[in-house]
Structures are given as C-alpha cells and as structure tokens.
C-alpha cells in the first residue's frame, strides 16, 4: 500500500504532506508530515478548541451575544459582511458560520473575543509544534509582513 501511495504523491505537482491512520489510531503511512504549510481554514479548529475550553471553564457561554460592527467585516468567504451593522449574534452563531460557511468575519470576531495570545497558548498547550496563528483572516498587510497561519500534517 505504501508503494502505491508514494507513486501517486510523486505524480503531484507541488509539495504534499500526508498522514494516513488506521481506524484504531495507529499511524500507517506518513509523508512529509513535518513540512510546514499555510494553514488556511484548518486554523479554525484551534479557535474552536480554545472556545470550547473557555466554555467548559465557564469563561464563555455559547449564548454570549456579540454585536456585528462595520469594522468587523472582511472580504472573502461568508455572509456576515453582507448583513446589517448592529446584528446581534451569539458565540454559537459565530462558530456555526465560521465552520459551515467558512465565514471570515465570524472567524475574526471570535479571534478578537478570545485573543490571539489565548489561542496560541492553547496551541502550545496541545504541543502543536508547527501550528501558529499570526494573523486574522483576510489581513493581507500582516501576510505581506510575513505573518501567516501555519501547520504541518503531524499537528493535525
């Protein structure tokens, strides 16, 4: 099986990182598992993890309400950028939009409310060595400065 997978990977253009695990959790195949890639939307899983740790400790509630402001809205995917300012959303609404609609505005609002430091502290606590949250969604200026969000397959 490893030989078949290796042949398929070698046919790809670009760089691939792959981990295939058996259902019982034992690692079966790893390829470039430590190479660091831009995280894209997978970084949202760390945001959810930090959120649920705060909900579990009762620092936050899924029912906490946040008001959508004009300055919160960013481009890219999502619908919040199209809705009216002053809209009341719960943390649960924002999580739902972040995951189901890949809503960048919802993601940034959650980052603002949790704090980037808190999310990165949780990433460190989980021992995710190659995962970093260094910018909000659609922050092109931060990206130009070299601040991007990263992860490797081994961290997933």
Image: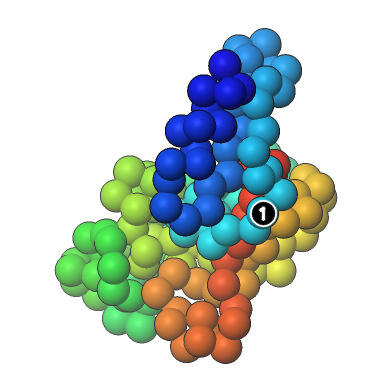
Q: Residues within 10 Å of mark 1 (few under 14, many from 20)?
A: some
Residue placed most toward the observer, 86 or 8: 8
Answer above or below: position of 144 versus 35.
Answer: below
Q: Is residue 120 left or right of residue 39?
A: right
What residue do we see at 27% from left, 59% from top?
78
Q: Quadrant of residue 2?
A: top right
Residue placed most toward the observer, 24 or 126: 24
Identify the secondary structure beneath mark 1.
Answer: loop
Residue 63 shows in the view: no
Answer above or below: position of 52 versus 74.
Answer: above
Q: Is residue 85 left or right of residue 153?
A: left
Mark 1 = which residue? 35
In percent of width and height, residue 79 lies at 22, 60
Across the whole image, how many numbered discs are drawn on residues?
1
In percent of width and height, residue 105 lies at 36, 67
Instruction: Name the quadrant of the C terminus.
Output: top right
Answer above or below: position of 113 versus 143.
Answer: above
Q: Is residue 28 left or right of residue 5?
A: right
Instruction: Name the quadrant of the N terminus.
Output: top right
What residue do we see at 81% from left, 48% from top?
127
In percent of width and height, residue 125 lies at 81, 50
In percent of width and height, residue 109 lies at 45, 67
What residue do we see at 43% from left, 45% from top?
12
Image colouring: rainbow
Q: Residue furthest top?
A: 24
What residue do we see at 29% from left, 68% from top?
76
Residue 32 shows in the view: yes
């Amino acid at each position: 099986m490893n030989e078949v997978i290796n042949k398929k990977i070698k046919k790809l253009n670009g760089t691939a990182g792959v981990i295939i695990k058996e259902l019982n959790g034992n690692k079966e195949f790893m390829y470039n598992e430590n190479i660091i890639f831009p995280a894209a939307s997978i970084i949202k899983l760390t945001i959810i993890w930090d959120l649920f740790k705060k909900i579990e400790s009762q620092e936050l509630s899924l029912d906490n309400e946040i008001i959508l402001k004009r300055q919160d809205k960013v481009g890219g995917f999502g619908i919040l950028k199209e809705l009216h300012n002053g809209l009341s959303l719960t943390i649960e609404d924002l999580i739902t939009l972040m995951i189901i609609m890949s809503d960048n505005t919802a993601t940034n609002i959650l980052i603002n409310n949790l704090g980037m430091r808190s999310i990165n502290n949780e990433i460190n606590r989980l021992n995710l060595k190659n995962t970093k949250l260094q910018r909000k969604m659609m922050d092109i200026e931060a990206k130009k400065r070299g601040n991007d969000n990263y992860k490797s397959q081994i961290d997933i």
